[in-house]
Image: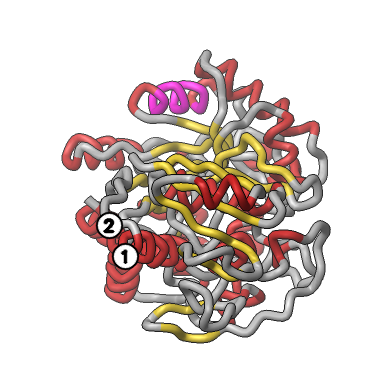
């Protein structure tokens, strides 16, 4: 692979981070950064400058202020169309591209807008409809990956022999176990409470179904694990699993890890697949709970736990990610919106979290997901046929840029019952489309 030398008038944590993301992670190049103009001009090989004016006749990208600032402030952003691409932070005609793709990429990937004042949803989360990407119609496009391709084209125009490390398209399915069973393993008090709710709501079908399951004359509707394993054997694709093992609470209602059957289920699935912790909703306000939950899962599977995905996708920057880093989580899979599919950070490739408050790149690798079952059915109210069409479009966008397509499903949504009637085919079609 080729080495690229980059000149900038001031090296900062921000521009060092985004240069590594574009050139090392997306284009597969070695990166050398300098703020010494003479050294840059004397350098051989592939090189470009990122500054306010060209030094000579090099490949020049006009810099905006964002990557040389510290702190967080409201940015004046105007989104425009350029040759079929959405862009912002315009940079004029002297630049190799008419927008500062480095500042724009940093703004999206660092989740800069989520540090700014914004309206939060009913679960106190950043809402997709507050995002720049949704407001300007590019949430469904991995624009940062597209911009990397534009950058590659500009480099090849000037340096035709440049060698890039090519990364291929990848598919990673994942399944969250928020509630391992609908009726089983709940204990006397929760079971009695369930019956009481059914009577109060006059939901006699639920009353009957619960009784049949508890009498073992009917399978628990959330017990879709044999079906999942059959799909693994059929397709050869193994999903990642994330287990909610937190204490019971208003938003955390999984089976207790004190239940032997739940521990056996976790170990059984861990024999087939990579696993991670599903930090409870409560752990966001009581960070000490996270360590307890990680240790619980570790004790069950007897291996280190380094993967996580937040329950309800509860992300608050930078606190959530700092909490993970402090507990030795190396990879997080929460980067996506609950109410809209697409690319929350504008990218479909794993990247390292940049802590804007500390102005530094961290060791936590963030893995964006593209589509979630609940988004398609419960938020967007799509039919199974419409959901499949949406998945196809999103997958095509990822394939165009050789990115990673990650899906997020749940064991209960594969039940083919109630609001999920007819949705098994969606998951089966997703596997076909994505593989």
Residue 424, quarter of picture? bottom left
406 is higher (above) or lower (below) than 149:
above
Please report the residue visible at 50 percent of the width from the left and 18 percent of the height from the top.
Answer: 301
Left or right relative to 367: residue 245: right
Closest to the observer, 253 or 375: 375
Stretch in magenta: 262-270
CB-based contact (under 8 Å), mark 2 and mark 1: yes
Residue 233: x percent and y percent? 19, 35
**Disc ID at residue 157:** 1
193 is higher (above) or lower (below) than 108:
above
Q: Is residue 250 magenta?
A: no
267 is higher (above) or lower (below) than 75:
above
What is the spatial separation of the Cα atoms under label 2 and label 1, in whole angstroms?
Answer: 6 Å
Please report the residue visible at 58 percent of the width from the left and 43 percent of the height from the top.
Answer: 352
Q: Does the magenta stretch include residue 264?
A: yes
Residue 215: x percent and y percent? 43, 37
- The residue wearing badge 2 is 160
Closest to the observer, 11 or 47: 47
Confirm whether residue 152 shows in the render: yes
Residue 399, quarter of picture? bottom left
Closest to the observer, 136 or 76: 76
- Mark 2 burial class by Cα count in 10 Å: few <14, some 14-19, many 20+: few
């Amino acid at each position: 692979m080729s080495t690229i030398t980059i000149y900038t008038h001031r090296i900062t944590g921000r521009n060092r981070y985004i240069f590594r993301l574009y050139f090392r992670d997306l284009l597969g190049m070695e990166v050398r950064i300098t703020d010494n103009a003479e050294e840059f001009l004397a350098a051989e090989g592939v090189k470009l400058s990122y500054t306010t004016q060209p030094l000579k006749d090099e490949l020049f990208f006009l810099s905006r202020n964002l990557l040389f600032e510290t702190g967080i402030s409201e940015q004046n952003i105007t989104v425009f169309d350029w040759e079929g691409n959405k862009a912002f932070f315009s940079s004029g005609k002297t630049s190799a591209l008419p927008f500062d793709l480095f500042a724009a990429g940093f703004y999206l990937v660092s989740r800069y807008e989520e540090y700014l004042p914004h309206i939060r949803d009913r679960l106190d989360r950043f809402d997709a409809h507050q995002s720049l990407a949704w407001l300007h119609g590019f949430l469904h496009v991995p624009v940062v990956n597209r911009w990397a391709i534009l950058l590659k084209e500009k480099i090849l125009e000037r340096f035709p022999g440049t060698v890039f490390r090519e990364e291929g398209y990848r598919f990673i399915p994942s399944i969250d176990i928020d509630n391992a069973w609908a009726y089983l393993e709940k204990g006397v008090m929760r079971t009695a409470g369930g019956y009481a709710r059914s009577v109060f709501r006059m939901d006699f079908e639920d009353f009957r179904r619960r009784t049949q399951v508890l009498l073992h004359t009917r399978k628990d509707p959330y017990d879709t694990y044999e079906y999942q394993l059959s799909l693994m054997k059929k397709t050869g694709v193994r999903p990642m699993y994330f287990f909610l093992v937190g204490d019971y609470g208003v938003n955390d209602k999984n089976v207790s890890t004190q239940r032997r059957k739940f521990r056996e289920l976790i170990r059984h699935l861990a024999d087939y697949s990579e696993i991670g912790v599903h930090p409870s909703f409560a752990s966001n306000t009581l960070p000490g709970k996270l360590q307890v939950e990680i240790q619980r899962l570790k004790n069950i599977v007897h291996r280190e736990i380094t993967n996580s995905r937040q329950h309800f996708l509860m992300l608050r920057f930078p606190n959530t990610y700092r909490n993970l880093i402090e507990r030795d989580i190396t990879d997080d899979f929460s980067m996506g919106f609950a109410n809209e599919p697409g690319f929350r950070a504008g990218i479909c490739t794993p990247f390292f979290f940049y802590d804007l408050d500390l102005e530094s790149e961290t060791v936590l690798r963030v893995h964006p997901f593209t589509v979630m079952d609940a988004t398609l059915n419960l938020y967007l109210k799509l039919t199974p046929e419409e959901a499949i069409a949406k998945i196809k479009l999103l997958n095509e966008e990822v394939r165009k840029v050789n990115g990673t397509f990650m899906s997020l499903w749940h064991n209960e949504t594969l039940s083919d019952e109630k609001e999920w009637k007819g949705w098994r085919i969606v998951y089966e079609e997703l596997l076909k489309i994505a593989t």
